Image (cartoon, rainbow, N blue to C red):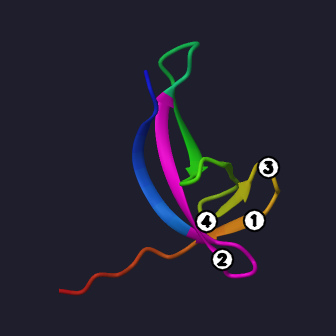
Amino acid sequence: MAAVLVGQFHARDAEGRVYSVHEFENTEATGDQLVTTYKLAIGDRVKKNDDNNFELVQSGVILVRDPSPIVTA
């Protein structure tokens, strides 16, 4: 099964730069176990450290998820 985009969010590094992170779900080649992976919009791989902290695999830059926007009616 191919990876399916299930979400996206913004995250910032320590210098305040904003990154668009895409969240994908896919099944591993060895079975039907669902795996979640993360990539920047430009394709760089991202590792999830915890719910709000992520790390760019190639450079080691730490990203912090921006809070979800609150929409008022």
Closest to the observer, 60 or 43: 43
> In 3D space, how far apart are the residues under numbered discs 4 and 1 (Cα atoms)?
10 Å
Q: Are marks 3 and 2 in contact (CB under 8 Å)?
A: no
Name the residue: 73% across, 57% down.
55
Q: Name the residue under label 2.
A: 17
Could you tell me what secondary structure mostly forms the magenta stretch?
A: strand
Q: Is mark 4 on a helix, strand or loop?
A: loop
| Mark 3–mark 2 distance (CA, rounded to whole Å) | 17 Å
Does the magenta segment cover residue 31? no
Q: In which quarter of the image is the N terminus?
A: top left
User: Closer to the N terminus: mark 3 or mark 2?
Assistant: 2
Q: Name the residue under label 4.
A: 52
Residue holding disc 3: 58
Foreground disc of the pair 4, 3:
3
The residue drawn where x is 70% and y is 55% is 49
Rendered location of residue 37, percent (x, y): 57, 41
- Magenta residues span 11-26
Determine whether label 4 and label 1 are within 8 Å by CB. no
Quarter of the image where the C terminus is located:
bottom left
Q: Indicate whether 18 appears above or below 47.
A: below
Q: Which of marks 2 and 1 is nearer the N terminus?
A: 2
Task: Report the Cα–Cα distance between label 2 and label 1.
Answer: 11 Å
Q: Work out whether residue 45 or residue 49 is closer to the camera in this orientation and state it.
A: 45
Which residue has dot 1 on it?
Answer: 62
